[in-house]
Amino acid sequence: MRWREFLVLGVVVLSGTGVASAAGIITIDKEPPQLIELRRAHEAEMKNAVTPEEVARAEEEYAQARKNALQDEGYRQKAAVLEEARRKELEAVEARYRKEKEALETASRKAVEEKYEKKLADLKSRVGQGGNSAYLARLEKLEQELVAKNDLAGALVVQTERRKIADPGAVSVPAAPTPKPAAESQAPAAATAGWMAKDNQVHVNSTRGLAGAEGNTVNNVYTFNLERIGNNASLRFYGFGNRSGNSYGKVYLLGPDGSRSEVAEWKPALLQGPKFSEVKSYADVQPVTADLSGKVTSAGQYRIEFKYTDGDEPLNIYRVELKTW
């Protein structure tokens, strides 16, 4: 034992006279086991104890480690892969959204479009009926009479007037076309021989023609008599509609041997020009060309036929050229 203590206990027994009657002494020669265990635990605790400064340093290290984790190369690579995947998913979602939205818009408008297209078609079909019907009949008769007289310019003006009455949205009556030379106005294009320029061998026919729907076709065949030919040939024609270039059709070449082949076409993309009322000559519209090499192989009579197939406008034909060299 490390030490020994003596505890003196004094017991005072008071008598009636106030004098101590007895006293005792206790000797302690060992520590209680419980005290020994408590002391050991306390000493071990003190060995592992840290200071507030050590705690503060650990907290700083933790914060810095969190920042450094986001700068790690492995983290950056994985983050880049995630971002790319996110971008692709967003693009897919956006594409699906646009597609579904377009489908929704189409479905939503379909009923409305069908309703009003039918209504407008019915209204347009009744425009010009009643009081205008007699006038339309007289205009049609006059147009036929002018065609019979080969007055194509007059027939075109009457036709425009008739279309304007039948469709109030049509343009006003156009100015009269440029008068044709007398030699050209005496016979239809189908019976008119082309002439050949002395220098460039271009055969030209400037007879005014019209290629439209059945019953609306006047001088739509142009005839050329070729006395001599070359190794190459080409076609050029100038045409436009009454109000726009909204016209479709095909052009055929008929040879001396009776052959008939499609050589060109016309459509809105190829027909460029002003309003019909502003067309003063063939030079006001854009020509359409076609290569006829290999098809014009012998001297003789060749015919160019224009056949309307579709569109809102017939084709007004201002000039047709057949070139050989």
Image (cartoon, helix red, strand yellow):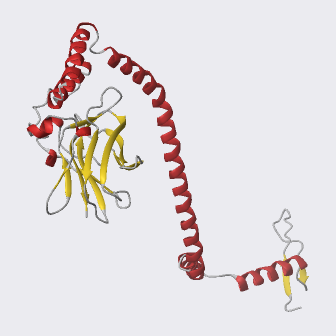
- Residue 281 on image: x %, y %: 12, 44
Left or right, residue 113 beside residue 90: left
Badge count: 0
The residue lying at 25 percent from left, 50 percent from top is: 225
- Residue 24 on image: x %, y %: 90, 77
Q: Observer-nearest residue: 201 or 258?
A: 258
Q: Is residue 191 above or below residue 230?
A: above
The residue lying at 86 percent from left, 67 percent from top is: 13
Q: Is residue 10 above or below residue 14?
A: below
Is any atom of residue 82 visible in this view? yes
Q: Is residue 167 above or below residue 26?
A: above
Q: Observer-nearest residue: 243 or 150?
A: 150
The residue lying at 21 percent from left, 41 percent from top is: 192
Left or right, residue 139 beside residue 248: left
Q: Is residue 63 above or below residue 302?
A: below
Q: Observer-nearest residue: 136 or 260?
A: 260
- Residue 107 on image: x %, y %: 51, 32
Image quadrant containing the C terminus? bottom left
Is any atom of residue 24 visible in this view? no
Residue 22 quadrant: bottom right
Q: Residue furthest top?
A: 131
Image quadrant containing the N terminus? bottom right
- Residue 232 on image: x %, y %: 31, 64
Left or right, residue 251 beside residue 191: right
The residue lying at 71 percent from left, 83 percent from top is: 48
Q: Observer-nearest residue: 22 or 281?
A: 281
